[in-house]
Image (tube, rainbow, N blue to C red):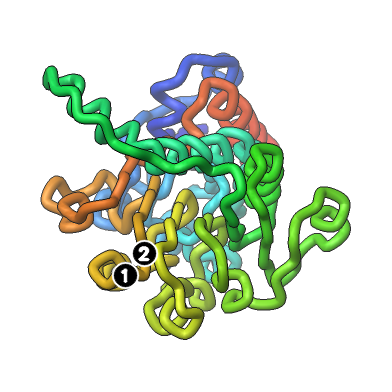
């Protein structure tokens, strides 16, 4: 069996996931993803299975792989928006991901971004690193109101953490677990509009699809009379478009934007988002903890093993 590994988190982090993969004695190729369609097309016919990151598995890539020897694409991580699932079904390629293993690390990263932004940690660090001593005045999070958009495993974990720290939490999801919310003192919103109204922080935890692309937009924010909202995005970049962020910041609709995800990764070094004030960007590290990487890595390998024959 010939396998391609492209997940950089898997590659860069030591742990038992490496031992499990090595013990299979596969013919293993390693590339640093995410790979584009143009990079995958010349090589996809070489492989029986893939452990991938956010590689671009278009219909053309999947069809070519299926017409050769490809059987399984095992996604290291949760999001499947870069994989043409309809094509995979049509051509008989099994797709597996790793749900329910990274919620603690991603939710803790939400908290890290929020605290860093409100207490100006990122700005203060850069100043003192250069020998300066400018003392910003920050904000406490206790008593602030946070809306959780998307109430899956990560959204639930983020709700629990922020609730424990004294924030007033409400959530919206089309399939919201009302029993969990009621049991844990999480408010239930009946719509996105209801969620966005009268909150200080909005944390995004939705998959990216036709329904959710651009779901946070200026029309929504203006109709809800939003002022001074901090948006935290550890899910997918296109849930809120660049123009919404730019205009929202300039008009005071948004007080800030914290993100761990970009439309194209690695980020263009000249991306206009990094030049905007009140924007904090991290390089997609929300699930990059030793604990989370090992758990996801093991699940990704097991998914491969269980579906490659």
In the displayed structure, 204 sits above or below 302; it is below
**Which residue is under mark 1?**
248
The image position of residue 223, as x and y in percent, is 47, 85
The kind of secondary structure element at disc 2 is strand
Name the residue nearer the viewer: 172 or 199: 199
Q: Quadrant of the C terminus?
A: top right
**Which residue is under mark 2?**
254
Res. 152 mark: none
Rendering quarter of residue 103: top right
| Residue 307 in view of the camera | no
Name the residue nearer the viewer: 101 or 94: 101
The image position of residue 306, as x and y in percent, is 70, 38
Rendering quarter of residue 127: top left
Residue at the (63%, 28%) spot, across then down: 295
The image position of residue 267, as x and y in percent, is 24, 47
Residue at the (20%, 29%) spot, across then down: 134
Residue at the (49%, 48%) spot, across then down: 69
Judge from the rendering whether residue 196 lies leftward or rightward of residue 44; answer left or right: right
Total residue callouts: 2
- How crowded pointer 2 is (Cα within 10 Å; few <14, some 14-19, many 20+) is rated as many
The reply to whether dot 2 and dot 1 touch (C-beta < 8 Å) is yes
Judge from the rendering whether residue 221 lies leftward or rightward of residue 305; answer left or right: left
- CA gap, disc 2 and disc 1: 5 Å
Judge from the rendering whether residue 248 lies leftward or rightward of residue 289; answer left or right: left
| Residue 27 in view of the camera | yes
In the displayed structure, 171 sits above or below 141; it is below
Q: Earlier in the sequence, mark 2 or mark 1?
A: 1
In the displayed structure, 219 sits above or below 39; it is below
The image position of residue 115, as x and y in percent, is 46, 37
- How crowded pointer 1 is (Cα within 10 Å; few <14, some 14-19, many 20+) is rated as many
Residue at the (41%, 81%) spot, across then down: 222
């Amino acid at each position: 069996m010939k396998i391609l590994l492209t997940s950089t988190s898997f590659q860069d982090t030591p742990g038992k996931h490496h031992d499990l993969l090595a013990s299979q004695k596969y013919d293993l190729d390693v590339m640093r993803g995410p790979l584009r369609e143009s990079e995958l097309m010349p090589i996809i016919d070489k492989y029986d299975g893939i452990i991938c990151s956010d590689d671009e598995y278009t219909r053309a890539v999947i069809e070519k792989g299926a017409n050769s020897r490809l059987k399984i694409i095992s996604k290291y991580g949760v999001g499947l928006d870069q994989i043409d699932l309809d094509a995979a079904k049509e051509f008989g390629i099994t797709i597996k991901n790793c749900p329910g293993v990274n919620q603690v690390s991603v939710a803790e990263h939400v908290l890290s971004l929020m605290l860093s932004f409100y207490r100006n940690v990122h700005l203060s660090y850069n100043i003192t690193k250069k020998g300066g001593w400018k003392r910003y005045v920050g904000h406490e999070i206790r008593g602030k109101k946070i809306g959780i958009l998307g109430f899956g495993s990560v959204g639930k974990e983020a709700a629990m953490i922020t609730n424990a720290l004294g924030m007033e939490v409400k959530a919206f999801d089309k399939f919201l677990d009302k029993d969990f919310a009621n049991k844990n003192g999480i408010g239930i919103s009946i719509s996105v509009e209801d969620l966005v109204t009268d909150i200080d922080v909005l944390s995004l935890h939705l998959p990216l699809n036709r329904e959710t692309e651009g779901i946070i937009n200026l029309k929504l924010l203006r109709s809800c009379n939003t002022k001074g909202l901090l948006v935290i995005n550890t899910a997918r970049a296109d849930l809120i478009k660049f123009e919404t962020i730019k205009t929202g910041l300039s008009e005071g609709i948004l007080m800030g934007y914290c993100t761990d995800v970009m439309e194209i990764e690695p980020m263009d070094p000249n991306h206009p988002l990094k030049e905007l004030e009140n924007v904090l960007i991290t390089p997609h590290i929300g699930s990059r903890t030793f604990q989370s990487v090992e758990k996801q890595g093991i699940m990704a390998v097991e998914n491969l093993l269980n579906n490659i024959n």
